[in-house]
Amino acid sequence: MTSSSAPSKQALSKIASNRLQKELKEWQVNPPVGFKQKPTDNLQRWIIEVVGAPGTLYANETYKLQVDFPEHYPMEAPQVIFLHPAPLHPHVFLKKYYFKGHFGGLGPYLSLLLSRKKEKP
């Protein structure tokens, strides 16, 4: 565990906590190609490294994301922040990316993080 995880504003609901524990276990057993989850001491904040997909403008680039899960995940979208360096992309504003604005507020969202990997600007 690392100290890169700051305390969250509100504690996770029981549903959110159970869901994130299940998803974290799935990542450990079957990690998605091109993604690496860095352990932290806070289930509500994940640090994820993403390698750009082959054949895209981001091929072989590595980006670090901070994913902050809200109290009522998966019914509320996580906040995703690109840590340095942030890619140049029309959907990345001030290093932050909110899934909710692009997907109508429907959960769950972690699988959307994986689906965004192959998208080009």
Image (tube, rainbow, N blue to C red):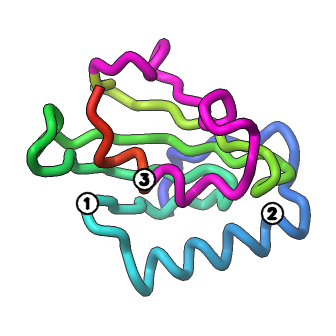
Mark seen at residue 16: 2
The answer to whether the residue labelled 2 contacts the one labelled 1, judged by CB atoms less than 8 Å apart, is no
Highlighted magenta segment, given as a residue range: 88-113
Q: Give above or below for 107 relative to 86.
A: below
Q: Give above or below for 25 relative to 23.
A: below
Q: Residue furthest bottom?
A: 29
Question: What amino acid type is highlighted by mark number 2?
Answer: Ala
Q: Earlier in the sequence, mark 1 or mark 3?
A: 1
Mark 3 or 2, closer to the camera: 3
Within the image, what quadrant is residue 31 found in? bottom left
- According to the picture, the residue beneath numbered tag 1 turns out to be 34
Question: What amino acid type is highlighted by mark number 1?
Answer: Gly
Q: Position of residue 76 (x, y in %)?
A: 79, 45
Task: Describe residue 106's horizontal placement relative to residue 101 as left or right.
Answer: right
Mark seen at residue 115: 3
Q: Classify mark 1: helix, strand or loop.
A: loop
The answer to whether the residue labelled 3 contacts the one labelled 2, judged by CB atoms less than 8 Å apart, is no
Mark seen at residue 19: none
Q: Position of residue 118 (x, y in %)?
A: 29, 47
Mark 1 or 3, closer to the camera: 3
Marks 3/2: CA–CA distance: 21 Å
Within the image, what quadrant is residue 99 found in? top right
Within the image, what quadrant is residue 58 found in? top left
Q: Earlier in the sequence, mark 3 or mark 2?
A: 2
Q: Give above or below for 85 relative to 49.
A: above
Task: Say which residue appears at 65% left-offset and 79% top-offset.
Answer: 22
Reply yes or no: does residue 96 show up in magenta: yes
Task: Say which residue appears at 84% left-offset and 56% top-offset.
Answer: 12
